[in-house]
Image: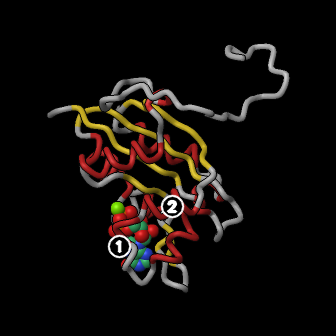
Amino acid sequence: MPNTKTLVLIKPDGLSKSLTGNIITRFSETRLEIIAAKIVRVSRELAEKHYEAHKDKPFYSELIDYIMGKLHKRHKVMALIYYGENAIEKIRAICGKTNPEEADPETIRGQYGRILTSGVFENVVHASDSIESAEREIKLWFEPDEIIYDLYPTEIKVFMNYKKRVWKDDPYRKYT
Ligand code: IDP
Ligand code: MG
């Protein structure tokens, strides 16, 4: 079986319930390798791009609020990339079914997920569902230099008038 990579998000309910450690421990059963990780404040633009396939669904606008953290007063998610043999299938198996009430209680969603009365499935984690969606999602959430392996082709771009926010008076700054 070939090595694949997959994007995992620990959604705002997972962070607000302090489940990060439990979730990463569950994923470590796969023996897959974490090759990138960060905490992200999710903009509306990022949320809409991530869930663009669902834009016609009745739960779409609440789904955007959910992933942006508006339902949990935690405006952040944790994004990780797992890499290794059959990564997509192995990670989704531990996540469990989309609907937390149908998910096996052994799975993350079965154990920690719930359905809000308004209808959205608060299911704690996101995981890519195919090689194609993993590529789209990894490129959406991460820049090449944030990942320890070269997963996809890259190119160098020179930006004119490029502005970047940096630490004020940083004695370690490598550029002027
Ligand atoms: P997945 O996360 O298992 O891949 P998708 O069908 O891609 O499931 O749906 C994205 C997210 O939208 C789900 O994780 C869940 O939070 C929410 N969702 C999906 N289907 C429903 C539904 O029928 N009702 C409410 N929320 C849903
Ligand atoms: Mg999906």
Q: Secondary structure at mark 2?
A: helix
Marks 1/2 in contact by CB < 8 Å: the verdict is no
Left or right of 90: which side holds 15?
right
Ligand 1: image quarter:
bottom left
Seen at 68% across and 16% down, the residue is 175
> Looking at this view, is 144 or 4 the one in front?
144
Seen at 38% across and 24% down, the residue is 149
Q: Is residue 79 above or below residue 171?
A: below
Q: Pointer 2: what residue? A: 47
Q: How is the image coloured?
A: secondary structure
Spot occupied by residue 76 in the image (x, y as percentages of width and height): 63, 53
Q: CA distance from mark 1 to mark 2?
A: 25 Å
Q: Pointer 1: what residue? A: 102
Is the residue marked 2 within 8 Å of ligand 1, measured from its CB? Answer: no
Left or right of 25: which side holds 93?
left
Give residue 108's quadrant in the image: bottom left
Seen at 42% across and 64% down, the residue is 51
Please state which amino acid type lies under the numbered disc 2: Ala
Quarter of the figure with the C terminus: top right
